Amino acid sequence: MSEHEHEHERECAEQGMVEQVRAEQEQAEQEQATAAHAEGVQAECTHAEPVIRIQNLVKSFGDTEVLRDINLEVNRGEVVVVLGPSGSGKSTMLRCINRLETPTSGHIWFEDIDVCDKHTNLNEVRSRLGMVFQSFNLFPNLTAKKNVMLAQRKVLKRSIEEAERVAEARLAEVGLAERMDYKPAELSGGQQQRVAIARALAMDPHVMLFDEATSALDPELVRDVLGVMRQLAADGMTMIVVTHEMGFARDVADRVIFMDGGVIVEQGTPAQVFDDPQHARTKDFLGHIA
Ligand SMILES: Nc1ncnc2c1ncn2[C@@H]1O[C@H](COP(=O)(O)OP(=O)(O)OP(=O)(O)O)[C@@H](O)[C@H]1O
Ligand SMILES: [Mg+2]
């Protein structure tokens, strides 16, 4: 074999090795992709785990039916924004979920709990389902920290030390590390609302319900509260949010629901509902608030 042929053979061998390595690499990548796909499917499965299930919910006050056959499932980690005109039943729906209102008929499950069962421990439901309203309802005579400690002590029976530790951590999370010892009157509306959020979070909720949490705030204070809500959503909290903040809805919602007259008129991704609403009532509503 000439030197030239030797060299050619060596090149072929090297080429062979390169090809073999490449093939092995491709196979590894293939396996990785399959594993990633399986993980993705797994993640989707986890994501599709319903945390709240509402079936055929009807709520009447006297002769007035304010919720008419509501059906809704919210999955773990999902952020659902509820829109609709005044009186459409948004608050009533949220209040039925944590049994501040008793449904007239229908079923609501929160995780494995039948919320409508009269034997259900409502304290357990409400501590796992944090709720933040338009009005903050803080105790005026207690500091921010004491406000956040109260339900932890009374409902969860935490020790003072534990309740204090959690209160400090939660208040720091909502940006109030410097304001823990202030009373509500010494805090701005936005700060008070963040105390209310910290109070709900201190109970280690599995779901947070927000009912127009920023509606009572001056515009410059809205941003801080929405910032806390955005962060919660980014951290994977399951949330149902009634709001008129369309920017928040567009950016943060996985799903937007439009209610009118006690029914869910339509729902979809923010792009579907905002950019391509299917129903005249949705178009009309969005036209008015745009
Ligand atoms: N406790 C109650 N007793 C009688 N009627 C009630 C009660 N609570 C709510 N309603 C009525 O039920 C309807 C739905 O009210 P709800 O507060 O759920 O509306 P909403 O969509 O939250 O409105 P808003 O945007 O103004 O907060 C309204 O017509 C309201 O007057
Ligand atoms: Mg309301």
Image: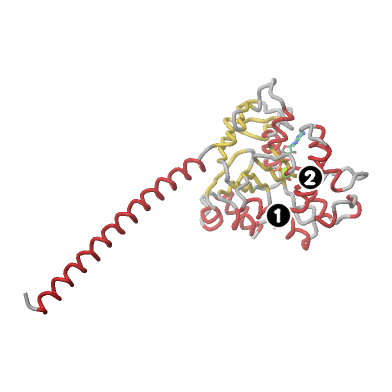
How many neighbours does mark 2 have within 10 angstroms: few (below 14), some (14-19), or many (20 or more)? some
- In which quadrant is the C terminus drawn? bottom right
> Which residue corresponds to the image point at 67% horizontal and 47% vertical from the top-left?
242
Residue 163 spot, x, y in % from top left: 80, 40
Tell me the CA gap for discs 1 and 2. Answer: 20 Å
Tally of marks: 2
Up the image or down, 116 lies above or below 133; here it is: above
Up the image or down, 1 lies above or below 142; here it is: below
> Ligand 1, what quadrant?
top right
Viewer-side label of 1, 2: 2
The residue lying toward the viewer, choosing from 29 and 104, is: 29
Residue 228, label in figure: 1
The amino acid marked with disc number 1 is Val
Residue 217 spot, x, y in % from top left: 79, 56
The amino acid marked with disc number 2 is Arg
Q: Quadrant of residue 259?
A: top right
